[in-house]
Image (spheres, rainbow, N blue to C red):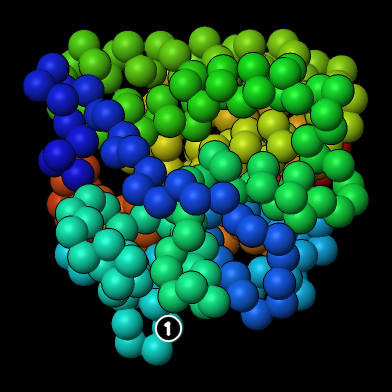
Amino acid sequence: MKREIADDGRFVRQPNRFTDRLGPPEPGRYRLYASYACPWAQRVLIVRRLLGLEDLLDVTIVDPIRDEKGWRVPGGIYLSELYLATDPDFRGRYTVPCVWDAKEGRIVTNDFPRITLDLETTWSRTPDLYPEALRPEIDEMNERVYHGLNNAVYEAGFATAQEAYEEAVGRVFATLDFLEERLTGREFLFDALTESDVRLYTTLARFDSVYYGHFKCSVRRLTDYPALWSYARRLYAIPAFGETTDFDHIKRHYYVTQTNINPSRIVPVGPELDWSAAS
């Protein structure tokens, strides 16, 4: 993580190491390594479920507690072993999601923004989460949400300088204010469920439980935004969203793993939130 802190205290996320595209779907070829704790990985889990790709994309859920060896995979191995088998010189963080290609014996991609788009286009099934006519608008929304919220919460949480922290927090709440206005009177960000809703949801699901306190994004809570809170609960009521949202994994991962922020490793009790009350 220290390698991703710039001299001015800003968090600068490492580039994705493996960026090959997924080939045509083949049963038994591709395996997704994911964590319920990770918002980038949950995106892929949601899309996999929405598109009914369970028979084409196998999945392994890693342990939520990551140590110096990285994510622990059931069976006693670590994700780092797959990274180093693919690139013995890799020295960055071992991240999820990543997709292992059993046919070629390598990680084909850990490029989290691209994985879901490949599933929605190359492996396309209904519903159409990335409709061709809307792609420029979806791409623009995705960029705005990524820089203003998805990644900005991390820039706030990992900042080591006050100015860097305050700048990131300012973007977070400017973006939440924009989204609150856009979603007032609307069911989704566009006229139907799209890739943009998937990307937004995984940050909202973690906001009050983790980002508000742990990452010091504490100007307002998600529950202080009526339209956003209602929207998040509507999505949670969809099985692909709700059944891949594990608050225990989320809280234990952030509070126990990120000891640079929480050296005591104490996992807080609460907050008490009724996600089942969709409206």
Q: Residue 32: which quarter of the image?
A: bottom right
Q: Give the structural element (helix, strand or loop) at label 1.
A: loop
Q: In the image, 186: left or right of 83?
A: right
Camera sees residue 277: no
Q: Is residue 91 above or below residue 260?
A: below
Three-letter code for the amino acid on which mark 1 is drawn = Pro
Q: Is residue 113 visible?
A: yes
Q: Pointer 1: residues within 10 angstroms few (<14), some, or many (20+)?
A: few
Find residue 73 and report its horizontal and vertical position in percent: 39, 77
Residue 198 in the image, given as x and y percentages of width and height: 68, 41
Quarter of the image where the C terminus is located: top right
Is 19 situated left or right of 268 in this image? right
Residue that protrudes farthest toward the left in the picture: 7
- The residue that appears at 80% across and 16% down in the rendered structure is 184
108 horizontally vs 71: left or right: right
Residue at which label 1 appears: 74
Q: Residue at x 87, y 18 (%)?
A: 185
Vertical relation: 179 (above or below) 31: above
Q: Foreground: 263 or 244?
A: 244
Does residue 38 lie above or below 25 as drawn?
above
Q: Nearer the viewer, residue 249 or 137?
A: 137
Farthest residue toward the bottom?
75
**Relative height, residue 223 to residue 260 (above, below):** above
